[in-house]
Structure formats: structure tokens, C-alpha cells
Image (spheres, grey):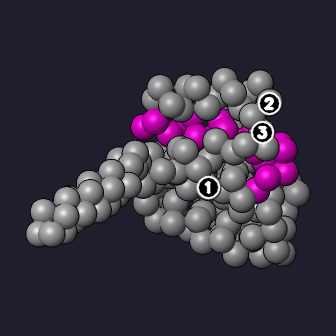
Amino acid sequence: MKTNHIQYLLAVSLLLLQFSCGNKPKSELDAGINDSINAKYRDNPALQKINAEILDNPSVDSLYRKRAAIYAKLKDFELAIGDAQRAWRLDTMNAQNYLTLTDMYYASNQTRLAKETLERCLKNLPKDKDAHLKYAELLFYVKKYQESLEHINKALEIDPYMAKGYFLKGMN
């Protein structure tokens, strides 16, 4: 009788061990990779290609920016924002990651988050001309013309040959 209880406990322990040690992602990033390879887009050749690249190089932020752009074209802003956030988490000192995240927020009508992201970018990377211009555009759209001009001028101080800066300045 005692051996039956021991065999029973051993069997239950083995089952628990087997089911609790499944293939879990190694990190949050790995979980994000698996989550963002969405089943409804499995037939999209552009996504298939970028997904394969991401699986081979999961720590390359530019790949997530590329995939975010593809999701944005497909109007799936939730996945686009998720990938833009992953890119930003991988390299918080790359202005392109902030700008991609800003674009995804803006495209999904989350202008407050877009503005906060640009402000964070300018705080961390105050010499980035593209961030100043993007922020100037956002300020222009919300009719804060003087602040917009200040950021255009900062961008033009950094790069006086930037045509887009002069174009925006002319619109103000």
C-alpha cells in the first residue's frame, strides 16, 4: 500500500515537472518576437522575409522599425506600435527609434503619446535635427507656430542645408 502511494506521488511529480518545464521564451524580447509574428499575416511575403530576419537577428532594432512600417501600411497600428516600442527598447539612443514610434502613435491618432515621445527624444538627443523638425511639424499642426519656428531654427542651426526645414519655416 505504501509503495502505491509512493508510485502515485512519483507519477504526479513527473507530470507536473513535464508540464511546468515547457518551452518558455528566454526573455520578454523573445516573447515579443513570437507574439508579433501574427497568424493573419502569414501569407504576406514582405512580413515573411522580415520575420525570418528578426528570428535570425532578434537584437537588431532596424528590423523592428521595418516591420512596424509594414504593419502601419496594413493599418494594424497595435502591432506597428509594439514593434516600434521593441526597437526603441533595444536602442534608446537612436533617434530613428523615437521617430518611428512617434509616427506610429501619430498614425493611430495618439497625438499625446507622439508628443511625449518626441519630447523624450529631444531630452535625450537634443542635437538631432530630424527630431526637432518632427516636433516642429507637430507643433505646427496644433497651431503653436512660435514654438514650431523655434524648433525649425534649432534644426537649421544643426544642418543649414536641410531643405525641409526651410519649407516648414515658409509655412509658418
Residue beneath the point at 53% across and 44% down? 33
User: Which quarter of the rendering shows the C terminus?
Assistant: bottom right
Q: Which residue is mark 1?
A: 82
Q: Which residue is mark 2?
A: 44
Q: Amino acid at mark 3?
A: Tyr
Q: CA distance from mark 1 to mark 2?
A: 19 Å
Kindly indicate whether the residue at mark 2 contacts the one at mark 3 (C-beta within 8 angstroms). Answer: yes
Residues in magenta, as a range: 58-77
The earlier-in-sequence mark between 1 and 2 is 2
Does residue 90 appear in this view? Answer: no
Main SS, magenta region, reads helix
- Position in image of residue 127 (x %, y %): 48, 51
- Give 125 or 89, whichever is nearer the viewer: 89
Please state which of the two labelled residues, at mark 3 or mark 1, is closer to the viewer.
3
The label shown at residue 41 is 3
Kindly indicate whether the residue at mark 1 contacts the one at mark 3 (C-beta within 8 angstroms). Answer: no
Residue beneath the point at 46% across and 36% down? 58
Please state which of the two labelled residues, at mark 1 or mark 2, is closer to the viewer.
2
Q: Amino acid at mark 1?
A: Gly
- Position in image of residue 87 (x %, y %): 52, 47
Q: Residues within 10 Å of mark 1 (few under 14, many from 20)?
A: many
The earlier-in-sequence mark between 3 and 1 is 3
Q: Amino acid at mark 2?
A: Asn
In terms of secondary structure, where does tag 1 sit? Answer: helix
Say if the magenta span includes residue 144: no
Q: CA distance from mark 3 to mark 2?
A: 5 Å
